[in-house]
Image: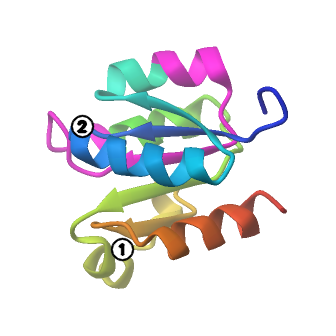
Amino acid sequence: MQDGKYVILCLDDDQDVLDVLRTILEANDYTMIEASSAEEGLKMYKESAPDFLIVDLMMEEVDAGTNFVKELKAMGNTAPVYMLSSVGDQLNMSTDTSDLGLSGVFQKPINPTTLLTTLKQKLGQ
């Protein structure tokens, strides 16, 4: 938490997606920190200790999102991590997302109600 607000780290290489997430999150009293690459995301994670993470599955490199999540797990991350993907529903059906260290998957384009409901549940609000 920063200044009494939950901190959400959003990692995506599409600025439009980050802008939509920021609009939703800040309108609902969350602090959003963004990163456009896995490398930048790790730096922001270490600096900000976010309460919740949203990570794009496919970024600048095919496995960037999954490698980022594996790195978080190795660092002992305890914050919920949700993957953001255009193949979200198929990923949920074909993969045990908890094996990847994920709490779940959001489908692109993200549904604001689903996002906010999930945040409230996972952050105990």
- Mark 2 to mark 1 CA distance (whole Å): 27 Å
Magenta span covers which residues?
43-65
Which mark, by number, is residue 15?
A: 2
Nearer the observer: mark 2 or 1; the answer is 2
Q: Where on the picture, by quarter, is residue 120?
A: bottom right
> Which amino acid type corresponds to the residue marked 2 in the rendered image?
Gln
Q: Where on the picture, by quarter, is residue 6?
A: top right
**Can the viewer see residue 50 in this picture?**
yes
Front one among 68 and 17: 17
Q: Residue at x 69, y 47 (%)?
A: 29
Q: Residue at x 36, y 58 (%)?
A: 84
**Colour scheme in the image?**
rainbow
Mark 2: few/some/many CA within 10 Å (<14, 14-19, 20+): few
Q: Residue at x 64, y 54 (%)?
A: 28
Front one among 29 and 91: 29
For the C terminus, the quadrant is bottom right
Q: Is residue 7 magenta?
A: no
71 over 115 or under it: above or below: above
Element under disc 2: helix
- Residue 107 drawn at (x, y percent): 33, 71
- Residue 74 drawn at (x, y percent): 57, 33
88 over 70 or under it: above or below: below
